[in-house]
Image: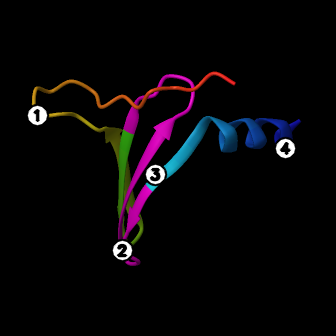
Amino acid sequence: MKEDKEMTMDKRFKKVYSQGAVNVTEIWADQETGVNYVFHASGYAGGMTPLLDREGKPVITPVLNG
């Protein structure tokens, strides 16, 4: 059952940008809602937050149904 959940997570989020090796910054897009998230990690610490535009609204990628 755990494998099914992991497969679902792999399909729901797609990495659309990545930079760095020690200080990593990535952008992930939710394939169901289109909301983009920024993930940043440095050493053993990391965090994720929605990516916002200059008006403070979440950046949303169009979702293709199919």
Q: Is residue 66 above or below residue 18?
A: above
Q: Which residues are magenta?
A: 17-36
State yes or no: residue 27 in magenta: yes
The N terminus - image quarter: top right
Residue that carries the numbered disc 2 in the rendered image: 20
Q: Secondary structure at mark 3?
A: strand
State whether the magenta stretch is mostly helix, strand or loop.
strand
Residue bearing mark 4: 3
27 and 66: which one is in front? 66
- Asked whether 25 falls inside the magenta stretch, the response is yes
Identity of the amino acid at label 1? Answer: Arg
Instruction: Give the mark nearer the N terminus: 1 vs 3.
Output: 3
Q: Residue at x 55, y 45 (%)?
A: 14
Q: Identify whether 45 is placed above or below 28.
A: below
Tag 2 near tag 4, CB within 8 Å: no
- Name the residue at the bottom extreme: 22
Mark 2–mark 4 Cα distance, whole angstroms, equals 29 Å
Task: Identify the image quadrant of residue 17.
Answer: bottom left
User: Amino acid under label 2?
Assistant: Gly
Quarter containing the C terminus = top right
Q: Residue 45 got which mark?
A: none
Q: Earlier in the sequence, mark 2 or mark 1?
A: 2
Residue at 56% x, 24% y: name it: 32
Q: Position of residue 54 (x, y in %)?
A: 10, 34
Neighbourhood count class around disc 2 (C-alpha, 10 Å): few under 14, some 14–19, many 20 upward: few
Real-space Cα separation, disc 1 to disc 3, in angstroms: 20 Å
Q: Which mark, residue 54? A: 1
Mark 4 crowd level (few <14, some 14–19, many ≥20, 10 Å Cα):
few
Residue 61, percent from left and from top: 41, 32
Q: Nearer the viewer, mark 3 or mark 2?
A: 3
